[in-house]
Image (cartoon, grey):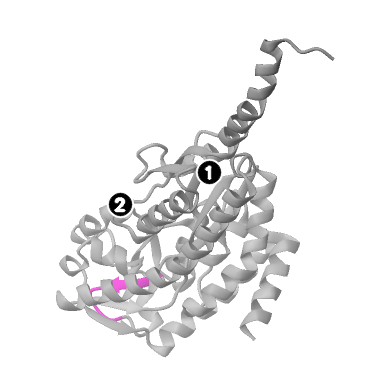
Amino acid sequence: MHFTRRATLGAALLPAFLHAVVARAQSLRGQAASGFGDGNYHTRNLRDFLTEIGSATGGAVQVTLHSNGSLLAQPQIKRGVQTGQVQIGEILLTAYGNEDPIFDVDAVPGLVQNLEDARKLAQVQAPFIEARFARQGMMLLYMAPWPQVAITANQNITDPAQFRGMRLRTYSPISSRLAALLGATGTLITAPEVPQAFATGIIQAQLTTAPVAADTAVWDYSRVFINASIATSKNAIFISRRAFEALSEPHRNAVLAAARNAEVRGWRLAAEAQAEAEARMTARGVQVVPASPALLAAIRRAGETMVEEWASRAGEDGRRLLAAYREARG
């Protein structure tokens, strides 16, 4: 068979051309969206995760983080990944409880008593989250917790009867349900509005976490921080499956390895954030106290009711999840 010089040159260049096409397909110049600020430990963790991916892939996978809702507002992030506006997103899982109760289980009061319980719940919850994300064209990378929800007030609440008629700041429908079961009047208020709400008497106590309390200068409006072990919510970080599967196998492995490291780091950072915030509050004169046995018992009783309500909403998957969690706790 006779080849012209042009054909021969084209054949020689074809492997290089194909290599370039494959290399472009297996690289990623993407965007990540988070609704949390740069100073938040979740954001720092996500940034370290993306940096680790870039280093491990020799710069082939580079994802730019847009934090504090600067690219997409928090409620838009999950949809943004589904539609390809961004490749990686971070959300507070419980914020999507109305979409699917499986996203909301970690917000059910009294289900976990500490970070170790929360870790066991996360382990059994993960496959259910992964299945739902997969149906929506996404893949879970890792989950990381927030410190436990607690109570701040101007006096120590040791007797559950003190809740009767109290105006209690809540942050979600499920926390408002807890307020009702405790006999309080729940009022949905965002964290930045809390100091003014205390000052004007709109609320007399609040449900919050230690870092949020410290960040809103709790010492200006509350005297007591009560560690009540109410709930431990989590953030989920996930990627477009199409973007992930376009990567080469070594690059996919690098992403997964960085995700495992970020998950370990996230649990450590949550514990550190709790301790650091409690130290800040103590230094400014806030009493950081454990919840009384009577208060803990009241929260657990309310939690038992709410677990049953959650299971009814979550159906068979919810019952399977709870059974696996209870077995893991022993």
Q: Is residue 30 above or below residue 155?
A: above
Query: Whole-percent x and y of residue 268?
Result: 41, 72
Q: Is mark 1 on a helix, strand or loop?
A: helix
Residue range (magenta): 149-156
* Circle 2 residue: 38
Residue 196: tell me if it is visible.
Answer: yes
Q: In this view, does 222 lie above or below 55?
A: below
Residue located 39% across and 47% down the image: 35
In the rendered structure, which disc, 1 or 2, sits on the residue that comes first in sequence?
Answer: 2
Residue type beneath disc 1: Lys
Query: Whole-percent x and y of residue 300?
Result: 52, 80
Residue located 50% across and 45% down the image: 88
From the viewer's side, name the closer residue of 271 and 287: 271
Alpha carbons under labels 1 and 2: distance apart:
19 Å
From the viewer's side, name the closer residue of 225 and 42: 42
Nearer to us: label 1 or label 2: 2
Residue 223: tell me if it is visible.
Answer: no
Query: Whole-percent x and y of residue 257?
Result: 54, 60
Q: What element carries label 2?
A: loop
Disc 1 crowd rating (10 Å Cα; few below 14, some 14-19, many 20+) is many
Query: Whole-percent x and y of residue 149?
Result: 40, 70
